[in-house]
Amino acid sequence: MMCGAFKITFIAATIFASCAHAQKAEPLLRTKQQCTTVSQLAGSIMELRQMGEPMQNLIMNDDGEYSSKETNRLVLLAYEEPRFSTVKGVKTSIQDFSNEAFRHCYAQGRSG
């Protein structure tokens, strides 16, 4: 299911291009908008994890760029979580993972 890997690559590239541009102006401060975008990426990763997408399809080549490192960090964290068989369990896991990614991003930006 390579469309999952393409989806993650596209989302990650979009997210981190905007983050890199914003970091030039505010290197230590992550905005609500940036963290919302990271949260959306996390939700997409967890959705694919819950659908059974193989982890190796989501890991990006480690080119040393922030985008691939952050995406791979989220993939590793997502695959530490269990898969659920109920619709409610899947939805809850996606929402919780997305919320935690936002919390981590926003707190990290505030601690400078």
Image (cartoon, grey):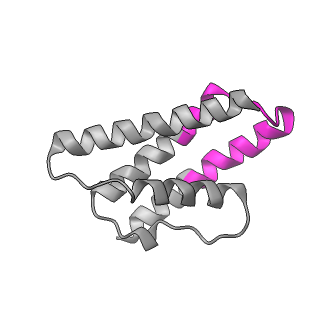
> Which residues lie in the magenta part?
12-38
* Lateral position of residue 89 relative to residue 66, left or right: left
For image coordinates 61% across by 30% down, the residue present is 106
Which of the pair 108/10 is nearer the observer? 108
Instruction: Check the image and report above or below for 49 versus 31.
Output: below
Q: Looking at the rendering, in which quadrant would you find the C terminus?
A: top right
Residue situated furthest left in the rendering: 86
For image coordinates 60% across by 36% down, the residue present is 105
Give residue 71's position: percent from left, percent from top. 57, 56
- Quadrant of res 104: top right
* Lateral position of residue 103 relative to residue 110, left or right: left
* Lateral position of residue 12 relative to residue 84, left or right: right
Is 58 one of the magenta-colored residues? no
Residue 43 visible to an observer of this rendering: yes
Which of the pair 21/86 is nearer the observer? 86
Give residue 70's position: percent from left, percent from top. 61, 54
Instruction: Check the image and report above or below for 39 versus 70.
Output: above
Which of the pair 46/4 is nearer the observer? 46
- Quadrant of res 52: bottom left
Q: Looking at the rendering, in which quadrant would you find the N terminus?
A: bottom left
Q: What kind of secondary structure does the magenta stretch mostly adopt? A: helix
Give residue 78's position: percent from left, percent from top. 41, 54
For image coordinates 61% across by 72% down, the residue present is 61
* Lateral position of residue 76 relative to residue 49, left or right: right
Instruction: Check the image and report above or below for 91 versus 79.
Output: above
For image coordinates 34% across by 51% down, the residue present is 47
- Quadrant of res 69: bottom right
